[in-house]
Image (tube, rainbow, N blue to C red):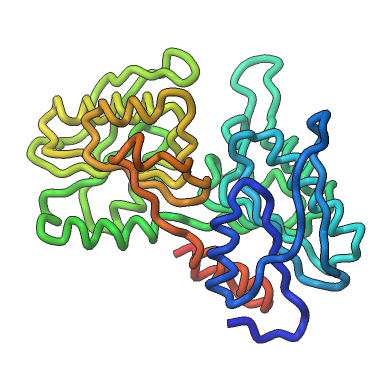
Amino acid sequence: MISRGKDLKIFAGSSNRKLAEDICRELGTALGDCETGAFSDGENFVSIYETVRGSDVFVVQSTSSPVNDNLMEMLIMIDALKRASAGRITAVMPYFGYARQDRKTKPRDPISAKLVANLITRAGADRVLTMDLHANQIQGFFDIPVDNLLGSPVFVNYFREKFADCHDQTMVVSPDVGSVARARAFAQKLDMPMAIVDKRRQKANSSEVMNIIGDVKGMNVILLDDMVDTAGSLCHAAEALVKNGALRVTACASHGVLSGSALDRINKSALDEVLFLDTIQPKPDVSTLCPKIRYLSVAHMFAEAIAHIYEETSVSKLFL
C-alpha cells in the first residue's frame, strides 16, 4: 500500500494501542518501538527506541480518560520525536479531548479546545488527523493542517445491511437541535426521513426531553450522536421516542466516552443496540457489563488517510 521511498513510522501512546496495531496491519508495516509510562511521582515519560531522523512519523493517541495523562503523554512523545529530527510529525487523534469547551458560554469561561490546539502545535506537531470533532470550528483553532475524518460511512454500511428488509419503516433522529446538520447528512446517505428530539438541558450532563419534532410512530429509529458520555441524554431520548410510538431504537455515536454509570443506564434503557467506533479503546469488560454495546473498527479509514498523507495525495474523498 505504501510506495514512497521516505520512511513511514507509526508510534502508539498508551490510550489506544489496539487501534494503532490494526492501522499498522492495514498498512502492512510494523508499529514503532517505544515505551511510555510514568515515574513514581506521576510524571509521564516516553522513550523512542529506533531512529526517526527524516522520517514521516504518525503518533496515534486518543486523549480519552485519563485525559490529562494521555494528552501529556502525546505532547511528550511529539517533543521527543521533534528533538530526534523527525521529518514530519502527524498527531493522529481518533478522539480529541476537551473538544466540548470550544467557546465561551458565560463570563470567565476558558476555551480549552483552543488551548489544547496551541499545546499540540507548540509541542512540534506538523499536522493533525482526527475523527468527528465535537465542533467543526475547532479545525480553525490550529495553525497547522487538520484532517477531520467522518465516521458516518462505517455506520451507513452497517445500517444499510441491518435495515435492508424494513428500509421504508426506518428513520434517523437527531438527539438535539445542535446535531441536526449531522443527522440530516446521515439521513440523506441512507435515503431515510428524519426527526428531531427537542430537549432543554438543565445542567451539565443532565437533560430533559421536551418534544419530538416529527412522526416516529411505527418506525425503527436510528439515534445519531458524535459522542456518548454519561448516556443520560441518549437514554432519555430513547425513552421519549418509544413513548411516541417508535418500534425500536438503535443508537450510534463515534466516541464512546462512557463515564460514570453510563453502562448501567444503557442496560436499563429502551435502547435496542448501541454502536460505537473504536476511536476510544473499549473497556475490557464492556461487552459483559453491557451486551447492548457493539464496536465497529475505523482502522481502515485511518490507514487510508495516513497512506494519502504520506504519499502527498488528496484525502478529500474520505470526507464524502
The answer to whether residue 199 is above or below residue 315 is above
Q: Nearer the viewer, residue 226 or 232?
A: 232
Residue ID at (44%, 64%): 320
Judge left or right: residue 64 versus residue 70: left
Find residue 193 and report its horizontal and vertical position in percent.
Answer: 21, 48
Viewer-proximal residue, 202 or 259?
259
Compared with residue 179, is residue 21 higher up or lower down, i.e. above or below?
below
**Camera-side residue of 119 and 57:** 57
Residue occupying the point 23% across, 58% down: 191
Which of 49 and 125 lies nearest the eye of the viewer? 49
Left or right of 68? Residue 159 is left
Viewport quadrant of the N terminus = bottom right
Q: Report the number of discs.
A: 0
* 1, above or below 34, in the image: below
User: Residue 111: image x %, image y %?
Assistant: 69, 29
Q: Residue at x 68, y 20 (%)?
A: 109
Q: For residue 175, which quarter of the picture?
A: top left
- Whether residue 215 sits left or right of residue 42 in the image: it is left
The relative height of residue 148 versus residue 106 in the rendered view (above or below) is: below
Q: Is residue 235 left or right of residue 104?
A: left
Residue that extends furthest to the front in the rendered view of this protein: 40
Q: Residue at x 20, y 46 (%)?
A: 171
Residue 71: image x %, image y %? 71, 40
Residue 104 picture quarter: top right
Q: Residue furthest left?
A: 218
Where is residue 43 shown, x and y percent of the image?
82, 34
